[in-house]
């Protein structure tokens, strides 16, 4: 079975994307900014974290169900 149609790998991949997004928002962006840590973390979480999480969940869910349907056929 292809990695593109393997439901477990799809879940793992999109979970990694979401985790990476939050690591950026909560650790990397504040570390490289000259503003206070909390301000940057809150700002990036609102601007990037929530949006990317919703987008990744939406795309991952659709992809998961398509792969699940193809694997059961």
Image (cartoon, helix red, strand yellow):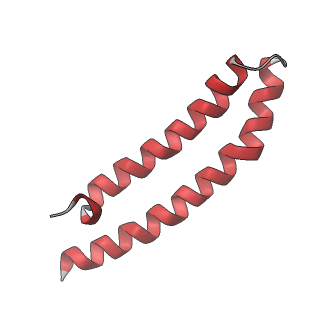
Q: Residue 46 at what x, y percent from top left?
A: 76, 44
Tell me: residue 41, above or below residue 1: above
Which of 11/47 is in front? 47
Point out residue 71 in the picture as x, y percentages from the top left corner: 20, 74
Residue at the location (19% across, 62% down)? 2
Residue 38, position as x, y percentages in the image: 79, 23
Quarter the N terminus occupies? bottom left
Q: Is residue 43 above or below residue 50?
A: above
What residue is rendered at 77% in x and 19% in y?
37
Q: Tell me what residue is drawn at x 66 percent, y 44 percent.
A: 49
Left or right relative to 63: residue 67: left
- Number of marks present in the image shown: 0
Residue 24 sits in which quadrant? top right
User: Where's the C terminus, which quadrant?
Assistant: bottom left
Q: Position of residue 39 (x, y in %)?
A: 83, 26
Q: Is residue 66 above or below residue 3?
A: below
Q: Is residue 63 left or right of residue 38?
A: left
Residue furthest to the bottom in view is 73
Question: Viewed as shown, does residue 56 lie left or right of 4?
Answer: right
Q: Residue placed at 45% from the left, 61% from the top? A: 60
């Amino acid at each position: 079975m292809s990695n593109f149609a393997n439901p477990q790998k799809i879940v793992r991949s999109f979970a990694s994307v979401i985790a990476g997004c939050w690591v950026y928002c909560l650790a990397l962006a504040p570390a490289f900014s000259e503003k206070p840590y909390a301000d940057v973390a809150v700002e990036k979480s609102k601007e990037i974290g929530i949006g990317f999480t919703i987008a990744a969940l939406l795309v991952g869910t659709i992809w998961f169900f398509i792969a699940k349907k193809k694997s059961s056929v």
